[in-house]
Image (cartoon, rainbow, N blue to C red):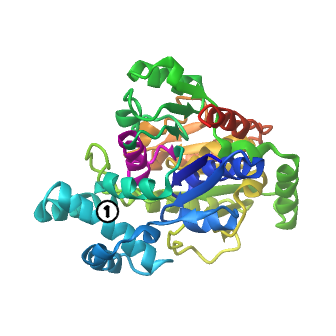
Amino acid sequence: MKRVLFVCYGSGHVRMVVPVARALQASGRAQVQVLGLTTAAPVVREAGLPLLQFKDFVDAGDADALARGRELAASMGQVADPEETAAYLGLSYAELVADASEAEAAKRYAADGRQAFLPVRTLERILRRVRPDLVFVTNSPRAERAAALAARRLGIPAICLVDLFAVDEVRWIGQPDYAERVLVLNEAVRDFLVRAGREPSQVRVTGNPAFDALAAPACVEQGRALREAKGWNDRRVVLWVEQEEPARHPFDGRPGDPTLPARAREAVLRWALGQPDVTVCVRPRAGQVPPTLPESPQVLLTGQDWPLHPLLHAVDAVVTLTSTVGLEGHLAGCRLIQVQGSVFDEAMPLARFGIADAAVPVEGLARALQSWVGAGRLPPRAGASATGRVLAEIDEFL
């Protein structure tokens, strides 16, 4: 039986991979394994998929790398899996040192953190041991990108699934030799990559499997029941999606504003607390420490333990910087307000693609909230089809 290795980070990337990997495993057409990176691991386990991690590929000669990894992990505070964190950081950092020098590696890591990593040789080690017939990655820039490059070196075909618009990732995904097949959200993204240099036959429109479940009748009903249970039927309900903003753009070094997310959150809360019929739900990212919130019945922390898709069917509007949750909210029928000012604005042009109802700076949030919160939800726009189309593309390599 052919083997397919999926490689993915957490958040939206693992949510793209899981429905495809589960469907492929259930079909019996291939043996499936998932290299679950950082916060992807618990999601992969919960999905019942065979999980691989960096720590599974540590060698006897990696003692120094692991020691360095533990040092780097110590600066991160509490982590869910210290052994895996040390392996991921240590092996990646050791490769950075080997590619540059100890001094240069320290300089790059101090400036860019994990964004400085591209552990191609580590991924070659993993691929040699797993021996997949196909490598499947998404558009993340570190270990996933390294997996596609390692697959090319070893003569293994690779598929890259792009979650959104590939505005930043075009730097490598636009290269004609990066993965044998690239799967994208819509025709506009396909045209963009073809203009960048990809052969038209290499780029296929499949949609994003992470969004397939949004329009399921059961999901819509769960949202309706949640809204009723929380007493929100006569209220305007806003979902603020927490994010972190880097001090520098990871690709081009442009300065960012790490205070932007907190300032935007405070603007949303300040407006909401002045509106007696408004409730604000605050959703931190996976692995993020929840923010300190006002003690008010109008403010509710809706963490990762809250199923996202029913929540999107229960709220009226989503406010975000550049999170994919904004697009999901749009697909579920929410009004969407995008806060501008992030270094990733160009990579997530939601208003330009007709997805956001408004794109405003922090100073314009109150006016936009007043205009769009309560403007009325729209019917869900998502449809269950992307997973099947992605599987059809995989079948061509099996």
Q: Secondary structure at mark 1?
A: helix
Name the residue nearer the viewer: 365 or 321. Answer: 321
Query: What span is colored magenta in the figure?
Result: 137-153
Name the residue nearer the viewer: 129 or 63. Answer: 129
Q: Residue furthest front?
A: 1
Do we see residue 266 in this rendering? yes
In the rendered view, tell whether residue 32 sits above or below residue 102. above
The residue drawn where x is 45% and y is 48% is 140
**Residue 301 on image: x %, y %:** 64, 70
In-image side of 105 versus 364 (left or right): left
Name the residue nearer the viewer: 139 or 370. Answer: 139
The residue drawn where x is 59% and y is 33% is 185
Tell whether position 353 is magenta: no
Q: Quadrant of the C terminus?
A: top right
Amino acid at dot 1: Ser
In-image side of 307 versus 38 (left or right): right
**Residue 357 on image: x %, y %:** 62, 36
In the rendered view, tell whether residue 190 sits above or below residue 36. above
**Residue 114 on image: x %, y %:** 33, 60
The quadrant in which residue 83 appears is bottom left
The quadrant in which residue 284 appears is bottom right
Residue that label 1 marks: 92
Q: Crowdedness of circle 1 by 10 Å Cα count: few (<14), some, many (20+)?
A: many
Do we see residue 273 in this rendering? no
**Residue 241 on image: x %, y %:** 57, 57
Tell whether position 145 is magenta: yes
